Image (cartoon, helix red, strand yellow):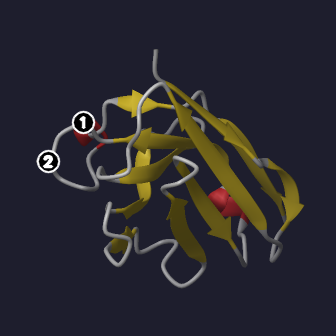
């Protein structure tokens, strides 16, 4: 059974930093893309960042570019999201996701099969 467990969310003031972690178990994703999405109340889930199995290939939503950094540790079957200069509009539940195949649009949630349960990030002004 595949499980993906996020951690590291919390409450932080605007301008602060948080690091989210996501540990996968049940299968390895070393050669698959992994990503972070987020969903704020009354909003649909939106793409945040993705890292290919070849870690040089990373993609970011324009809203987080320059502030967030995605990374992965294939030995640990984990993916991370370093979030700096946080803004109140970054408040959302953050989800990690893992792709199984090799096709699909990197920013579409339909590309990813496995999802974590989500971790809340709240940024106060």
Asked whether the residues under the numbered discs 2 and 1 touch, taking CB atoms below 8 Å apart as contact, a structural biologist would say yes
Comparing 69 with 42, the one in front is 69
Q: Secondary structure at mark 2?
A: loop
Q: Nearer the viewer, residue 87 or 29?
A: 29
Give the quarter of the image for residue 107. bottom left
Q: Badge 2 is on which residue? A: 104
Farthest residue toward the bottom?
A: 66
Residue 17 x %, y %: 79, 70
The image shows residue 97 at horizontal and vertical percentages of 43, 41
Tell me which numbered mark, 2 or 1, is placed earlier along the sequence: 2
Query: Residue 65: horizontal and vertical position, in percent?
Result: 48, 79
Q: Would you name the residue on which mark 1 appears?
A: 110
- Residues at marks 2 and 1, CA–CA distance in whole angstroms: 8 Å
Q: Nearer the viewer, residue 98 or 27?
A: 27
**Residue 46: x percent and y percent?**
42, 49
Residue in the picture at 39% in, 60% down: 50
Q: Is residue 83 above or below residue 10?
A: below
Question: Hey, which residue is sitting farthest front in the picture?
Answer: 75
Q: Is residue 3 above or below residue 83?
A: above
């Amino acid at each position: 059974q595949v499980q993906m467990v996020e951690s590291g969310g919390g409450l932080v003031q605007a301008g602060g930093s948080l690091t989210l972690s996501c540990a996968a178990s049940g299968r390895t994703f070393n050669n698959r893309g992994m990503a972070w999405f987020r969903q704020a109340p009354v909003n649909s889930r939106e793409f945040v960042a993705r890292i290919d199995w070849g870690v040089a290939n990373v993609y970011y939503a324009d809203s987080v570019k320059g502030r967030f950094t995605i990374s992965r540790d294939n030995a640990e079957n984990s993916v991370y999201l370093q979030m700096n200069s946080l803004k109140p509009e970054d408040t959302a539940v953050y989800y990690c996701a893992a792709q199984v195949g090799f096709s699909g649009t990197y920013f579409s949630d339909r590309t990813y099969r496995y999802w974590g349960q989500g971790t809340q990030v709240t940024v106060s002004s």
